[in-house]
Amino acid sequence: MNLSHTGKHRFKYEKGSLKITTNQKPVLEFGESISSITAIAGKNGSGKSSLCEIILHAMATLTEGSMGYNRPFDGIVCFDVFIFHHDSILIRNKIDLEKNGYTLVAFKETPLESFLNELGHDLQHLGFMYYSNVIDWRSGLSENNLSNISTQSQIHSDLYYGPHYPYHPQDDREQHQNTYYGKVKMDLMDGYQYEEAFRQTNFYLNFSQFIPFNHPSHLRIFLNYSGNNKWLSLDDFPYEVSSKVQEYERTIFDNLTPSYHVDVIADNKDIKIDAALVKKAASWLYKYNLLVSYSKEKNTLPTSQHTADFVFNGDYPAEIFDEHKDLVSELVQLMDSIIESSEVYETYNPVYLSSRLQGDWRIALVESLTVPNTAKIRELLKKIIDAENLLLNYEYRSIKRLNNYFMIPKPSAGEFSFLSLFSRIYQAIKWNELGHYDRKYFVLFIDEGEINFHPAWKKRFIKWLVEYLNTGIHKYKFQVIITTHSPYLLSDLSSDSVILLDIIDGKTNVLESGSYKTFGANIHELLADSFFLKDGFIGDYAQEIIESLVSYLTNQKDGGDWSKDRAQRLIELIADDLIRQRLVDLYALKFDEPNSLRDEIAILEQRVKLLKSRLK
C-alpha cells in the first residue's frame, strides 16, 4: 500500500519481491507547506483507523536519540531511501533495490530497533501528529515521537499539564483528603473542558479571519488564584515564608468584603458592590499572580515589601524582574486595559456563593471579566497570552497561564469540532517550537476530522486544511494522512491520493487506484464506488416503505396497512421526481384513474413553464 508521497518510486510486494515503479509527479499541489495528502476511505470495520495506528506504532518511536515501541511489527516500511522489513519476510530482489539506491534493513520487532546511528539524525527532523475527535481507547497512542492531540489523549493530559489541581477518584480516601488540601480540584472532564476552551479561544484570537461562522459577541477572562491554579500554589515553600506572601492575596479579597466565614454572612441577601472596587481588586490579583508565578520560575519567593510595592504601589523591583521588567510592565498595562473595558459583577449573594464554590468564594466577585469581542480587545488578549508564554512557559507542554478564557456564546457542535481540529494543531505546533528546535517535517494523521460538520462544511474541509497549513505561521512541511467517510473529501483528491478499503469474505482488501476516479467526481458516483453503496442512496427505512407500497400497488401482497388514501399521500411526500412519477403510474393503473395521469402531466407542464420563465 502506497501513501501519497514525493519519493522516486512506488512499491508493491508480490510473490516474494518488492517491485518498484516510477512515482509520477502529482498533478494536484497543495502549497509549499504540504508535500502530499492521502485519504483512506472504506466501510466501517475495514481498518482505516487501525492502519493509522500501525504506521504510528512502527515509525513514531524515535526522539532525541531514544527509541521505544508498544507493539511488535512484522511488515515492510519504506522510508526515504531505507526499506525496513521483518526478518521473516523474503525479498528476492534485494540486489535490484540496492542498485536503485535503497538500503535494506532487517529487524526483529520494530523497524528502528537497531538503526539509530545511521538514521537517528534524519528522524530528529521528523515528528508525528495524530488527531481524532472521538473518545476511543485506541486513540490513546503514546509513542516517543508523537504529538497525540486526540480527544482521548487530551482528556488525560490536560489535567496533568494544565494549571488545575487534579482530582483522582481512584485514590484512597485518606490520600485524597491530604492531596491539595483546601484546593479547588477538577476531574478529567472538567480539566479538559477548561483547556479546550483556552485552546479554542487562543486559536480564535490568532485566526479570527479564518473562522467560517458567526463570531462570538463577547470574550470572557477568568482570573485565577492560589486555590484553583497549581502554578500559583506556595505549598512547596516553607510555611513561615509562604504565609507572609500569601497574606497579600487574602488582603485583596478582604478589600472586597471583610470575611468569608459563614457566621458573618448569615443573611441570605444580595449585596451591592462598587464596580470600580472590583476592577481595582482584579488588577491587584493579576499583579500578585504574575509576581508569584514568575518568582516560582526562579525557585524563590518575593519579600513582603517587594510584594506590597509591586501589587499595591506599582513599583517593579529590579531584584525580582531583572531583564524581564519591560515585559512584566507591558503585561500589567495590557491586563489593566482589559479590566477597564470589562463588565464585572455589581451584586452578589454571599450565602449562595459560599455554598456553591470550593475554596475562597470571594474569587467569584473578581474572577469574571466579560469584554466585547472587538479587534482591539482580541489584539490585547493575544498579546497577553503571548507575553505570558514568553515569561512563564519555559517547560515543554506545561501550560503556566494565569487565566482561563472562553468565548460567549459557546460554539455549536459543528463549530466546536472545527475549532478543536485547528486549535489543537496550532497548539501542537507551538509546543514543538518550544521543545524541538531542529524539527522540519510532520506526518499529520487526521482520523475522521469532519465529524459533526454540516455537508456544506465537509465540502470545504480540504480547502480549509490546505489554507491553514499554508498560512506561513510556522516553518514545518506536512505529509497529511486522513481517514474519512465523506465523499466530499475524496472529490478534492486524485485517485492516486486515495486508498479504498473493502471487506470481502471478512478480509480487508486494498483496491487498485487505477480502478476508480475521485477528483471532481459526482457525489453519487463516489458513494457507489468509494463507499461501496451498491443498493441506492436513499435511507433503508424509506426504501423499505416504498418497496412495500410498490408491492401493494402491483397487487403482490394484500393491503395490510395500505389504503388508497394513504398510498396517495405517501406518493405526494416523495422528493425524487422519477420515483414519484413511476408510483403515480402504478397508482393510476391500480385504481383505474386516468385523470391522475392527466393531473400529473398538467403539474409537470406548469413546472416546465416556471423553469422557462426563470431562464428568461
Image (tube, helix red, strand yellow):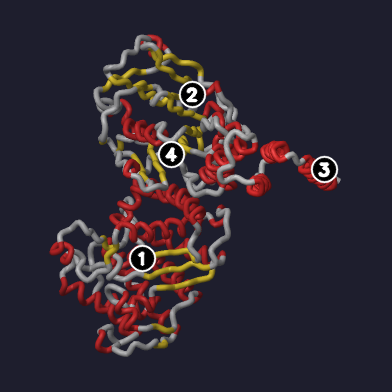
Spatial separation of the CA atoms under disc 2 and disc 3:
46 Å
- Report if residue 436 is visible in the image: yes
Inspect the image, locate mark 3, and give the three-letter code of the amino acid beneath it: Glu
> Dot 1: within a 10 Å radius of its alpha carbon, few (fewer than 14), some, or many (20 or more) residues?
many
Q: Which mark is residue 444?
A: 4
Q: Amino acid at mark 2?
A: Leu
Q: Quadrant of residue 306?
A: bottom left
Find residue 310 and name its label: none
Per the model, the C-alpha gap separating discs 4 and 3 is 54 Å
What secondary structure is found at the residue carrying circle 3? helix
Q: Nearer the viewer, mark 1 or mark 4?
A: 4
Mark 3 lies on residue: 605
Q: Is residue 586 left or right of residue 264?
A: right
Question: Which residue matches tag 1?
Answer: 402
SS class of the residue under badge 1? loop
Cα separation, mark 2 vs mark 1, equals: 52 Å
